[in-house]
Amino acid sequence: MKRYFAILSILTILAACTTIKATSEGYKITKEQVEEIKPGVTTKDNIIDAFGNPTNVEQKEDGTEVLTYTYKEKKTPTYLKGLIINERGSTTTTATLEIVMKDGTVLSYNFKKQEKE
């Protein structure tokens, strides 16, 4: 019984000392920012002001340009002020925004957000 109590006490202490370590790559892309994009109205300058420089730019043969923005955020549980890291409990969220431009104006866009455990 004492052993059970000791294990339960340790688990309770570990749970109380849990923090989340967050790391990210790229510019954060929010749903609100994406909703501000208006095909036929929003310009390339507006896009760069809102999202910064794209992760990738692709020139198409039809004269369109595809700007791709990628944002990744990884959250990892840690215990005892980061001494123990639980990689198996990590979640990664990836947001991808592809914007098709023609003559400096947004033609269309696609926004995807995925979460992986």
Image (cartoon, grey):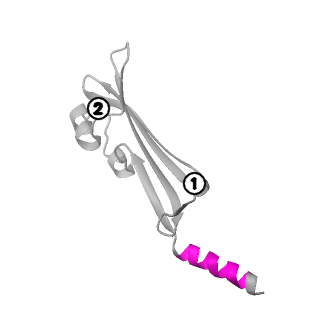
**Residue drawn where x is 33% and y is 16% of the image:** 63
Q: Is residue 5 magenta?
A: yes
117 left or right of 4 in image: left
Mark 2 or 1, nearer chain start: 2
**Residue drawn where x is 59% and y is 57% of the image:** 89
Q: Quadrant of residue 86?
A: bottom right
**Residue drawn where x is 28% and y is 35% of the image:** 53
Q: Label 2: few (<14), some or many (≥20) within 10 Å?
A: few
Image location of residue 66, percent across then percent down:
37, 26
* Cα gap from disc 2 to disc 1, whole angstroms: 44 Å
Which residue extends farthest bottom?
2
6 left or right of 92 in image: right
The tag on residue 40 is: 2
Q: Is residue 69 magenta?
A: no
On-image quarter of the N terminus: bottom right
Element under disc 2: loop
The tag on residue 33 is: none
The tag on residue 87 is: 1
Image location of residue 82, percent across then percent down:
48, 63
Query: Which stretch appears magenta?
Result: 4-16
Image location of residue 73, percent across then percent down:
45, 50
